Amino acid sequence: MCVRVAGGVPGVERHPITATMVMKGPVETMSAGGVSQKSENEQLVSVLMVGDVCGRSGRKCLKRFLPGLRERLNLDCIVVNGENASGGIGITGKVADEIFASGVDVITSGNHIWRYREIISTLESTTRLIRPQNYPPGTPGHGFTVFPTASGVRIGVMNLLGRIFMDPVDCPFRAADQILERAELGRAADMWLVDFHAEATSEKAAMASHLNGRVSAVVGTHTHVPTADHRILSNGTGFMTDLGMTGCIDSVIGMTVESVLPTMTTRMPNRFQTADGEGSLSGVRLTVEVKTGRCREIQPVRCGPWLEEAGIR
Ligand SMILES: [Fe+2]
Ligand SMILES: [Fe+2]
């Protein structure tokens, strides 16, 4: 289901809170330049955010699907979570380059970012690969970046890490506040997208409420299973609890069944193997009004086997 602020989907009742967000104008028509221009006041950008890319299978997915999705969805910016891109855990500089070459503009990450120590030099040499902002001061790398689109729209992307059922880190809520205090919406960036890498659905929902109206979107990553709760909150922030995984879904969240089951059934430690079968891409497409930073449309995007396809027709 695609959730729009104005209009709606036949047969689907709009949420009363969402319905209070009245936007003017007809259904948007994308221009060839990638930015929709309905009137002087309504410039829109189209963004794809993709869930955790897992191993070679996930990277193949990006190569296979992103060129077509960029064209078909008229994307101005593609953001993917790459924390599992190298062998299922972590990411190397070489793999980051491979992902960028697939057409990705910004890579976010999460708790597995430090798996390969060599990534530190990449984190320090590029602003397009970011790590969670709420690691303690002195941690290498950057927790947010501003990506300029071809048409000059400044898309801010921030990465935060949850604290419930995860290793201790600084407060993600205050970290987000501090970024926005330094770079208010509309000043340093025309819009902000938040990848909240967290385990607990409650913490993700709380973050979305905390940032409602101050950022364009809050999307969750880390749990590798797409949720069906994509929606636009009362003050114009798009939200989805988890984007899902990009990789071999026929697995235990990216690891082979054969390598995970012995540990689950006996509690004996075992080395997990990354599943290498045909992969699926899972994420969300967001349409954001540049003038206000408000999310106008949020739509799940899924392609490949195992999951029902969405958002590509
Ligand atoms: Fe992950
Ligand atoms: Fe993670």
Image (cartoon, helix red, strand yellow):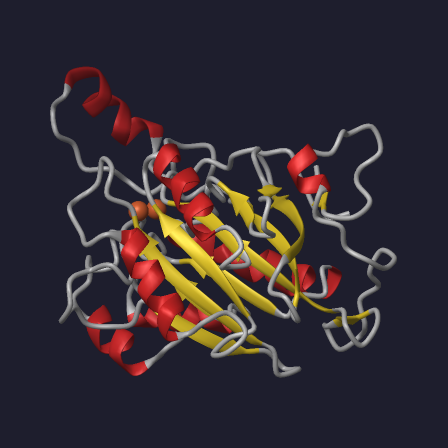
* Image vertical order of residue 177 relative to residue 218, above or below: below
Q: Residue at x 53, y 45 (%)?
A: 239
Left or right side of 107 for 274: left
Q: Residue at x 83, y 72 (%)?
A: 39
- Farthest residue in the right direction? 26
Left or right side of 22 for 125: left
Q: Nearer the viewer, residue 197 or 116?
A: 197
In which quadrant of the rendered view does residue 127 lie? bottom left
Give residue 202's position: percent from left, percent from top: 37, 33
Give residue 195's position: percent from left, percent from top: 42, 55
Q: Residue at x 28, y 76 (%)?
A: 122
Give residue 246's position: percent from left, percent from top: 48, 47
Left or right side of 243 for 22: right
Q: Residue at x 66, y 71 (%)?
A: 291
* Image vertical order of residue 210 relative to residue 273, above or below: below
- Total tally of numbered discs in the picture: 0
* Image vertical order of residue 125 relative to residue 210, above or below: below
Q: Is residue 130 visible?
A: no
Q: Nearer the viewer, residue 13 or 243?
A: 13
Give residue 201's position: percent from left, percent from top: 39, 34
- Farthest residue in the top direction? 265
- Farthest residue in the front direction? 20
Q: Is residue 248 visible?
A: yes
